[in-house]
Every structure is written in structure tokens, then in C-alpha cells.
Image: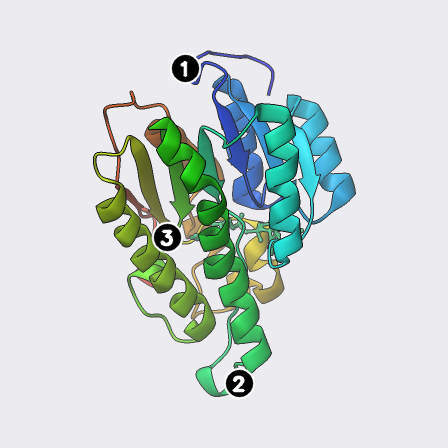
């Protein structure tokens, strides 16, 4: 993470879920691109170490707790004087269970991280972005927000919902100077899959068939690095090494 280019010219970027697999790749790519970063995650040691590596602000907490979202707003208000230039809603929770075995609390929990939290984050910063006439909200979606897979009741409901939210924002924000981008990857080789051991399950993609998180981070960087008058509304990314399972 040492060489630095300046494409992002010190743009202020708030990234959630920085300690996860895609979050780490995004942190590295955005830092190399010259961004100033504020990172969120739940694990304080992991987040502090990552933030130290790239000179970022670390804000530890759970995005399903509204008080934490208010705390993020207060910290960045102090540090940056208002909204970030770019918000990347990346934190996510995954669940794999047949519909009838999906516990209602778990269903609500997945929606809280993947749908309610991105809504609340965007809701926190949009008034400031609109007043400024600039800003960018990037939502990390999923192929499961466009295609149904068995066992994905909670996850798909959350990602289809997030795509709906994104599409409403595209319509509402056109012409305001505030941009929104939907990133839609197929399976990515990250710790999200660790609980499910995908290489031993024929119904799941093998790790070797999944996207590299660095490739997805590159697509996010591309969307963010566009000039202000260019809006990348959607990037759909699929693995080219896939047998069709996901
Ligand atoms: N991996 C895939 O196959 C895939 C495919 C398409 C899209 N995506 C999407 O990509 C994004 C990143 O996923 P990933 O693969 O990098 O997963 P990951 O490695 O499991 O990382 C998830 C991140 O989200 C954070 N997070 C989870 N629940 C949270 C909560 N309640 N409050 C705050 N942070 C929370 C985690 O923090 P902790 O470390 O503290 O748990 C972690 O930093 C997600 O939106 C996911 O849906 C993933």
C-alpha cells in the first residue's frame, strides 16, 4: 500500500466494512489512489491496524446501532467539516439457509446491515451533499440482488431492496450534482464464505471460480475517479471462470 498516485486528489471517502475481504482491497486501492479515508468496522484491533497502514481515521462500531451512525456523523463533522465526498456502503452480512429455516431475527439482522444501514448512512449525508451540489454514494450490491439462489431469502431480500433504493436515488438525484453507483459483483473470494466451506459444497461456487476482491475494488475506483460530470450508475461484474452456479 505504499505507492501513491493522485487520481482521487485527496478526496474524502467514508468506507464501511473496511475490515472485510472487499473492504481491505478497497482500502488499499483508494489509499493508493490518493484518497483521505475514514474507515468503519466492528473489530477495534483489526480496524486500528488497517487504518494505521494507510493513515486513515478509524471509527469502530456496529452499523445496526443508530447511535453509532450518529457518532460517525459527529466524528466526520469535526474532522472534515461535513459530508464526505464519497460514501461507500460496503459492510454486509450474508446468510445461507432454506426459507423455512431462516429465523425471523436473523432475517431482520441481515436487512438491518445490508439495507437499513445504507439507507441511514445515505440519509445522514445527503442533505449536506445536496446543499453542496456534489457528492457520491456507492452501494455494494450483489448478483443476488438481481437473481434468486436457493438459501438466499434474507440476503436476496436485502440486496434486491438495496438495488431498489439505489434506483430511486438515481431518479431523485439526477441533475443535483450528487452521483450514485451500484456495484453488482458475482461471488468474491472473501471471508464472507468461511462459514460455509464452498469448496466442499457442489451447490456453491468454488473459491477458484470467484472474483478476486482486487478486481472489484478496481471497478469501484473507476466509478469514483470519474470527472464530476460523469456518472457511472451501474457496474455489473461477473467471474469469467464460473460454471454457472453463481
Ligand atoms: N463475498 C461475496 O461473494 C460477495 C459477492 C457480492 C457482493 N458482496 C458484498 O460485498 C460487501 C463486502 O463483503 P465481503 O465479501 O468483503 O464480506 P466480509 O469479508 O464478510 O466483510 C464484511 C464486512 O462488513 C462488516 N459488517 C458486517 N456486519 C456489520 C455490522 N452489523 N456493523 C458494522 N459492520 C458490519 C464486517 O465487519 P466485521 O469484520 O466486524 O464482521 C466486515 O468488515 C458486502 O456488501 C457483500 O454483500 C460480497
The reply to whether residue 61 is visible in this rendering is yes
Judged by depth in the image, the label closer to the viewer, 2 or 1, is 1
Q: Is mark 3 within 8 Å of ligand 1?
A: yes
The residue singled out by tag 3 in the image is: 186
Measuring from the top left, give residue 71's x and y in whole percent: 66, 44
Instruction: Indicate left or right for 129 with 39 as reference.
Output: left
Label whose residue precedes the other's in the sequence (2 or 3): 2
Q: Which residue is mark 2?
A: 101
Which residue is drawn at the image coordinates 21% and 34% (left, top)?
Answer: 175
Mark nearer the viewer, 3 or 1 = 1
Which quadrant holds the C terminus? bottom left
Q: Looking at this view, name the residue that lies furthest to the front.
A: 131
Query: Dot 2: within a 10 Å radius of its alpha carbon, few (fewer than 14), some, or many (20 or more) residues?
Result: few
Tell me where residue 226 sits by quadrant.
Answer: top left
Q: Is residue 228 above or below residue 140?
A: above
Q: Position of residue 130 (x, y in %)?
A: 36, 35
* Up-down relation of residue 164 to residue 51 (above or below): below
Q: CA distance from mark 2 to mark 3?
A: 24 Å
Report how far apart the C-alphas of labels 3 and 1 lie in the structure.
Answer: 27 Å
**Label 1: which secondary element:** loop
Q: Earlier in the sequence, mark 2 or mark 1?
A: 1
**Residue 151 appears left or right of 229:** right
Q: Residues within 10 Å of mark 3 (few under 14, many from 20)?
A: some
Q: In the rendered image, which residue does mark 1 sit on? A: 7
Q: Secondary structure at mark 3?
A: loop
Does dot 2 land on a helix, a strand or a loop? helix
Q: Looking at the image, which is closer to me, 245 or 163?
A: 163
Q: What residue lies at 58% left-to-right and 45% top-to-bottom? A: 17
Residue name at image x 60 percent, y 53 percent? 63
Which of 204 and 111 lies nearest the eye of the viewer? Answer: 111
- Between 234 and 117, which is closer to the camera in this rendering? 117
Amino acid at each position: 500500500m505504499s505507492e501513491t498516485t493522485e487520481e482521487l486528489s485527496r478526496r474524502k471517502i467514508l468506507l464501511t466494512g473496511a475490515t472485510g475481504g472487499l473492504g481491505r482491497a478497497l482500502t488499499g486501492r483508494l489509499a493508493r489512489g490518493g484518497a483521505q479515508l475514514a474507515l468503519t468496522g466492528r473489530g477495534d484491533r483489526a480496524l486500528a491496524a488497517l487504518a494505521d497502514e494507510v493513515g486513515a481515521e478509524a471509527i469502530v462500531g456496529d452499523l445496526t446501532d443508530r447511535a453509532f451512525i450518529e457518532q460517525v456523523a459527529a466524528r466526520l463533522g469535526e474532522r472534515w467539516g461535513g459530508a464526505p465526498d464519497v460514501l461507500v456502503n460496503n459492510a454486509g452480512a450474508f446468510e445461507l439457509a432454506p426459507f423455512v429455516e431462516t429465523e425471523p431475527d436473523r432475517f431482520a439482522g441481515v436487512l438491518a446491515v445490508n439495507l437499513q444501514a445504507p439507507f441511514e448512512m445515505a440519509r445522514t449525508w445527503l442533505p449536506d451533499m445536496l446543499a453542496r451540489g456534489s457528492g457520491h454514494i456507492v452501494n455494494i450490491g450483489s448478483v443476488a440482488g438481481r437473481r434468486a439462489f436457493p438459501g438466499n431469502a434474507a440476503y436476496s431480500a436485502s440486496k434486491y431492496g438495496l438495488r431498489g433504493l439505489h434506483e430511486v436515488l438515481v431518479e431523485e438525484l439526477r441533475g443535483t450534482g450528487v452521483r450514485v453507483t451500484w456495484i453488482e459483483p458475482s461471488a468474491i473470494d472473501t471471508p464472507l464464505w468461511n462459514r460455509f466451506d464452498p469448496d466442499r459444497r457442489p451447490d456453491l461456487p468454488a473459491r477458484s471460480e470467484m472474483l478476486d476482491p482486487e478486481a472489484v475494488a478496481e471497478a469501484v475506483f473507476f466509478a469514483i475517479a470519474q470527472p464530476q460530470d460523469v456518472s457511472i450508475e451501474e457496474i455489473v461484474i461477473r467471474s469469467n471462470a464460473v460454471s454457472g452456479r453463481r
